[in-house]
């Protein structure tokens, strides 16, 4: 059993995880506003990432969305370099740029709906 864990790299991951947990015992995560959460995809190789996405799509019956899921996973792995992802269209690149540069660019009707609901809740 330990040989299987070792061949999959699980032993090293478990030890790393336990040492990280031990280092956090004195940290109040609810009050640590400067805490950073590590991207869970950051340490995947491109091959393992695409393999995991393919396996996920097959097990969940999402085969028709596989190309989109692969692009999304590659972008999620390192969002700063989304323009280098192969297969991403110019329209998708522009949408991702807008997401970063114009975060609150939404239709006016959405803001009117939100404000109306807030006023309604306050009056109620």
Image (cartoon, helix red, strand yellow):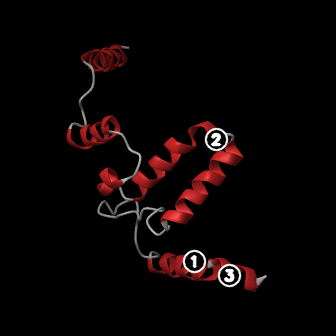
Question: Residue 62's x, y, as percent?
Answer: 63, 40
Q: Residue at x 20, y 41 (%)?
A: 101
Please say if 123 is above or below 34: above
Q: 2 and 22: which one is in front?
A: 2
| Separation of marks 2 and 3 at Cα, in angstroms | 29 Å
Who is closer to the viewer here, 14 or 54? 54
Q: How many marks?
A: 3
**Element marked by disc 3:** helix
Sort mark 1 into few (<14), some (14-19) or many (20+) by Cα contacts within 10 Å: few
**Near-viewer residue (114 or 25):** 114
Mark 3: few/some/many CA within 10 Å (<14, 14-19, 20+): few
Q: Earlier in the sequence, mark 1 or mark 3?
A: 3
Q: Residue at x 47, y 76 (%)?
A: 25
1 vs 3, front mark: 3
Mark 3 sits on what residue? 7
**Image quarter of the C terminus:** top left
Specify which label sits upstream in the sequence, 2 or 3.
3
Above or below, 39 against 106 in this view is: below
The percent position of residue 103, horizontal first and vertical second, equals 25, 37
Between label 1 and label 2, give the one nearer the viewer.
2
Q: In the rendered image, which residue does mark 2 sit on?
A: 63
Q: Is residue 90 left or right of residue 101?
A: right
Q: Nearer the viewer, mark 2 or mark 3?
A: 2
Contact (Cβ within 8 Å) of mark 1 with mark 2: no
Kindly identify the residue that appears in the image at 42 percent across and 76 percent down.
26
Mark 1 or 2 closer to N-term? Answer: 1
Q: Residues within 10 Å of mark 2 (few under 14, many from 20)?
A: some
Q: CA distance from mark 1 to mark 2?
A: 30 Å
* Tag of residue 13: 1
Give x and y (percent) for residue 51: 60, 59
Q: Position of residue 123 (x, y in %)?
A: 33, 14
């Amino acid at each position: 059993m330990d040989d299987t864990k070792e061949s999959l790299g699980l032993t090293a991951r478990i030890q790393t995880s336990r040492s990280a947990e031990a280092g956090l015992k004195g940290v109040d995560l609810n009050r640590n506003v400067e805490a950073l959460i590590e991207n869970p995809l950051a340490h995947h190789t491109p091959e393992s990432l695409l393999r995991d996405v393919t396996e996920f799509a097959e097990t969940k019956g999402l085969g028709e969305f596989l190309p989109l899921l692969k692009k999304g996973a590659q972008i999620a792995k390192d969002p700063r370099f989304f323009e280098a992802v192969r297969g991403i269209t110019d329209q998708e690149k522009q949408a991702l740029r807008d997401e970063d540069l114009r975060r609150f660019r939404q239709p006016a009707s959405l803001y009117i709906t939100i404000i109306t609901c807030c006023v309604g809740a306050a009056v109620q």
